[in-house]
Every structure is written in structure tokens, then in C-alpha cells.
Image: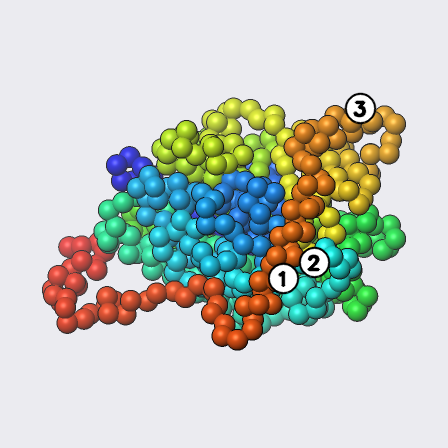
Amino acid sequence: MSDGKPNILILMVDQLNGTLFPDGPANWLHTPHLRALAERSTRFANTYTASPLCAPGRAAFMSGQLPSATGVYDNAAEFPSSIPTYAHHLRRAGYYTCLSGKMHFVGPDQLHGFEERLTTDIYPADFGWTPDYRKPGQRIDWWYHNLGSVTGAGVAEITNQMEYDDEVAFCASQKLYDLARGGEDRPWCLTVSFTHPHDPYVARRRYWDLYEDCEFLQPEVAALDYAAHDPHSQRIFDANDWRSFDIGEEDIARARRAYFANVSYLDDKIGALLQVLEDTRQEAVVVFVSDHGDMLGERGLWFKMSFFEGSSRVPLMIAAPGMEVGCVAAPVSTIDLCPTLCELAGVSMDAVMPWTTGESLVPLGRGGERTAPVAMEYAAEASEAPLVALRYGKWKYTACALDPEQLFDLEADPLELRNLAGEAAHQGTLRSLRAKAEVRWDLARFDAEVRQSQARRWVVYEALRQGGYYPWDYQPLQRASERYMRNHMDLNVLEENQRFPRGE
């Protein structure tokens, strides 16, 4: 701690299904380090992403605002530099802010309040992945998901994603050592953001072997016939090119096994970082969260893009002084993390709340209550108009101008198999939630804004691909002349300053 302000370590993962964390990690997952973190954390069992896709979900997490406010509707929408993030708020309050890993920023601003980035991003920063509502049903094969991730599931010792996360963890570990050696006298916030367990479902052998006898290699709800799905789920199937793949039980088992294995891979990475904290005698608030979930074959769906629990619900654990250890059942959102981090850091809420629609989770972590509905939005690939949802108490309500409404009672029907929207006994609840949604969203306006954004970006992307091309992808700075030993440094001073602990 510096000047009474706590250091903050944010551990973010990608596409981790929150139903696997009913109260910390499920007891059958091989995750000793995350289990130990859970035992000292406030655990939020019903946390929802603001949007079940990487870039919009992450922009919402950082800013505390929904995609309809940020304009980050999809994985190729620019995150405006003028939107304050938790990194801006903390840096303004005197924090050193640093990112190691993925945040899927699109646009020329690749920092968004971070003073330093240690790695590049794993995904492109330009407009090339822009969907197009003007072409309903269009599938862009070179970047859309397909079910080859399922049929190709298995074992490998290195992949594109493993190479990335190995680097993310190494750079974060180095940074924690540097912070311990006293190179920074400000409080710090280090965000370490991994890309696993995001598909493709490929794992290292030592983690794969942990799940040889796993009892959870098949989904609870087997694949439904295409015609039995709601219209949005059908669009997801089409976007995933389902007709080109024959998915059998063995494919499903291998994909789920690799996914669980990669959760254990992440557990090792996170455990190593927490061990560096302990070894270097540094104290920090620790936050563990995912950007969205993964359906993992439930009802035949894979990946995200859906408001069903597997895709939209995420794990969230916060280990912080003054927040009680235990499980909070009240529904919360990832947009609540921006004001939460600021309150934990002692930032004036008057300076934060004008720029976020989230609510601090600190009161919930001290035994308080939350009754406000949790909102979600989706306006990216596999949609043809924006979809919105509310989680309110035990209810989940979804709406889209193109689709029938959905209403689920998650206490009685946690697998979301019975849509109550058409049942006479639930019309009062349906009308109440519809009214709450209509106060919050003008779907026609939302749709028009998404279409305008898409159309603009297609013009800009095609123009910038002509002639000389200057990429927006982040280029990490190494500053080689300031590393290790150089002739402008006093070797004796250098060796003493770079040692931790000193004099032992």
C-alpha cells in the first residue's frame, strides 16, 4: 500500500462459464489456486457480462457502461478515447496503471488510461471484423467462429493462444518483481488478462490428463433440433456454420475436456502470480473475473453470443480488506467493477459516477442488498438487430425487435428450458419486465445507431486497406538501453537496487 491506497491486481480470463463457479470453482475442477483465492474472497455467484462478446464486454467492464453507451457494439467497433475507464480514474488518483495481455481495444488508442502495456493484443485492432446488418444471414468465413474448434479439439504442447498466455504471465510476473524492487513509489493497478479458456479447445497434455475420468464431459441438455431453437439461437448456429460439421458425443467430450484442462492451465498461471506477490511481500486487492462465458455444447450451442446462462454468466471474486468473505447471491454486472475498483482505491465517487451506470459492489461485500435489475445487450455477429436482457431477482427477460420475448424463472428452471412469456400465469411479470426494458431502451434508435456505426466502419476499413497501411496494433516498448546493465549505469548501484530482498 502507498499513502493508504491499496495495490490492485486484476486477473481477467476469457470465455469462462460462470455456472462452473456456483460459489468459487466447482469442486471437481482441478483449480487449487483459484479455490484458495475463493476462500478469502467475496464471491458473486450471479455475475453477468454486459455483452456476451469480447470487445463489447471488455469495454463495458473497463468503463462501467453498456455497449449502447460506449458504441462498442461488436469486435470491430472503436472504443472512443474520450470515455473514462477505471484505468483513467485510478491513474488520475495517483496510481500507476499497467496491462499485460488482452483487452481487445479497437482503434488507434491502445491504452485507454493504462500508462504501460507489456504485450501486444492477440486480436486485430482495426475494423476488419465489422458485421453488416444490411446483409442479414451473411457469414464471413475468415473470422467468424465455426465448429471446427469442436471437431479439432485435443492436445498440443504449443498453440497460438498458449504462446500468448505464456507471454502474458511471464511479463506480469516480471512486472510484479519490478514493483517489489521499489522502482515505483505510487500505488499500482496491474491488469493481467489471459485469452484462455477461449476456444480453440486445445490443451497441454499435463492438464488434459487431469480430466481423464471427468464426469462432466457431456452437457446437461443435449443438442436440440435446429427447429426447436429460438430464432437468435438459430442465427448463432448459422453463424457457426453448423451444417458443415457433424458433431458427435466424442467431439463434445474432447472439447469440454480441453476447456476444463485450460481452466487448470490458467489456475497454474494465476497461482504463480499470486506466489510472486507473496514472495515479494506485496499486498494487493485481488479481482478475478471473465469477460463472458461459453455454452460448451449445452442444447447444441457453443462459444458465446447468447443470453443463456453458460454464455452470459461469469465468475467474479474480490479479495479486499473490508469486504466480507462469503457468497453473494444478488445478481450483479461486470459494469459494476469500474466503480467498485475506484471505491476500493479511495477515489471520490463524485468523480466516477457521472461516467458509469454501474454500482459499486463494496456495499454488497459488506452485507448490503441489491435489488436493481442487471442489464445486458448484444448487437454483433449472429444478430440482425440488437438484443437486450434483464436479470431481475429470479427472472431473466430478453427482447429483440425481430424475435418473440423470452421469460425464464431461473430458480425453478436453471437450465432455461421453459419460456414463460406465452403463459397466462406469468403475464403480469412479463408486462412489468417489458416496461422496465422500454424505459431503458429505445430499440429502434439502438438499431439505427448500430447500423450507422457498421456502415461508417466499412467505408473507413476499405479505404485504409488501399495503398500504404499503418496498423493500429499495439507495439510493446522494450527500451533495451534501460534494461539489465548498460554503461550509463553504476554496476554496484544497479546490482543492489535490482535485488529483492536486499541484504539477506
Which residue was labeled with disc 2? 132
Under circle 2, the secondary element is loop
Residue 44 locus on image (x, y percent): 55, 37
Q: Residue at x 82, y 47 (%)?
A: 230
Q: Where the N terminus falls, by quadrant?
A: top left
Mark 2, other Cα within 10 Å: few <14 / some 14–19 / many ≥20: many
Q: Which mark is residue 458?
A: 1
The reply to whether dot 1 and dot 2 touch (C-beta < 8 Å) is yes
Which residue was labeled with disc 3? 428
Kindly indicate the quadrant of the structure image that contains residue 198: bottom right
Residue 67 locus on image (x, y percent): 59, 45
Residue 227 locus on image (x, y percent): 88, 53
Asked if 225 appears above or below 68 in the picture, the reply is: below
Q: Where the C terminus falls, by quadrant?
A: bottom left
**Disc 3 residue type?**
Gly
Under circle 3, the secondary element is helix
